[in-house]
Image (cartoon, rainbow, N blue to C red):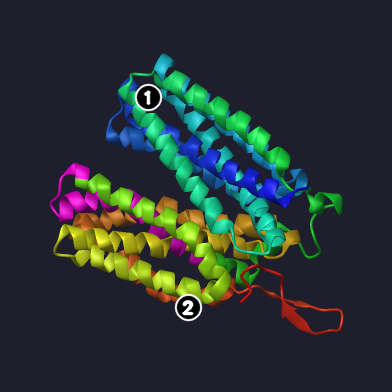
Amino acid sequence: MNVVAARNGVAATFGLNGLAVASWFARVPAARDALGLTAGELGLLMLSLSAGAVLALPVAGLVAHRLGAARTVATAALAMAAGLVLAGRAAGAWGWAPAVGVGLFAIGFGAGSCEVAMNVEAAAVERRLGRTIMPRFHAAWSLGTVAGAGLGAAAARLGVPIAAHLAVIAAIVGGGTLMAVRSFLPDERAAAGGAGKGGGLLAAWREPRTVLIGLLVLVMAFTEGTANDWLAVAFVDGHGVGEAAGAASFGVFVAAMTVGRTAGTVALDRWGRPKVLWATMALAAAGAAVTVYADSLPLALAGVALWGVGACLGFPVGMSAAADEESRAPDRVSVVAVIGYTSFLAGPPLVGLLGDRVGVLRALLVVPLLIVPALALVPALRPPRVATPAGHTEPARSPTAI
């Protein structure tokens, strides 16, 4: 199988996954108006999506072991497509919130399952290429979200019904993913008869290295998610700018993340995971502090850019590290994803509660307060050492083994 074709297929899968999730979020205002929901009721409805993702993550590794990455991703994409169609139809045509919740659960469950399987496949492609490429796959996901947001904004402006819009996106996501997975690498674990020695999801939860990687991913997911959720509000409330400038601050962050993930692969190959992550995490902490304390808008936006560049590599590199040993990759990636995704559930209310007391802008200081102790977790991302036939040990094969 052509590894370059597999690389392109994985990148397309990441992009389509981002497109699916962002397309729903872009039409949330239309769904809210169609259903006549209050902010609190909308928040409860949106929990259906998070619940689906959280429930999928613990079992996704087992499914990937049994079905292989390609079939797991294909099945997950079809679940997302069905969820998009149901959510759009229930919101736009039926006005029935419970059915929307079922659709959102399917989107979340499909996205969570896809998260594990496509990262496992991405790590396999990365190993065969012999160079770091995982962050670029996550950059493809970011580009997919940008496309979904743009298409959603255009559909809303043109008055395209939410049901029709999401049905078209569902067809693109489902059909595109089915084509993309055809170029995935052959599943060597399945060909060998199942999981590797010492495998199992419960065993992965008992591995100190896997749990430490998960904790680092949790902190970096919180670092990224806090900016996604609160930057625009923090700039409006804390720096006294208009909504357009607040939205621009979020745009600067996303752009910095995308650029960092694209260029960061070169740094990882040259200096290795620990050195690059220590540097980028320090940048994220400094950038968040500058964002809070800046006394001018340009300086605050510079802080946002530093924050984005610093936050961009933690999540993808953590996934890559969890998949260093291919035979154990599905279980370990599943564990790391479960731990990391906890931040997406706990992060927004934590910052919100702090914001009620000290203001949303000052509440962002929780980011550097978490990053500084998390620097001690970085050594866990070094590739594990494996025994050689002569009885010696050497680093496991990895594009970032420096």
Of callouts 1 and 2, the N-terminal one: 1
Residue at the spot 53% in from the left edge and 44% down from the top edge: 53
Q: Position of residue 301 (x, y in %)?
A: 25, 58
Is residue 397 found left or right of 79 in the rendered image? right
Q: Which residue is mark 2?
A: 376
- Specify the segment rendered in magenta: 216-244
Residue 34: x percent and y percent?
33, 21
Q: Percent x, y for residue 371? A: 39, 70
Which amino acid, mark 1?
Ala
- Spatial CA distance of label 1 from label 2 is 46 Å
> Taking 13 as reference, is 223 left or right?
left
Pick out the residue farthest to the top. Answer: 93
- Is 386 positioned to the left or the right of 345 in the image? right
Q: Residue at x 60, y 44 (%)?
A: 114
User: What is the quadrant of residue 157 in the picture?
Assistant: top left
Tell me: residue 86, above or below residue 212.
above
Q: Nearer the viewer, residue 326 or 63?
A: 326
Q: Per the image, is 229 magenta?
A: yes
Residue designated by label 1: 155
* Residue positioned 53% across, 66% down in the render: 266
Give the number of marks: 2
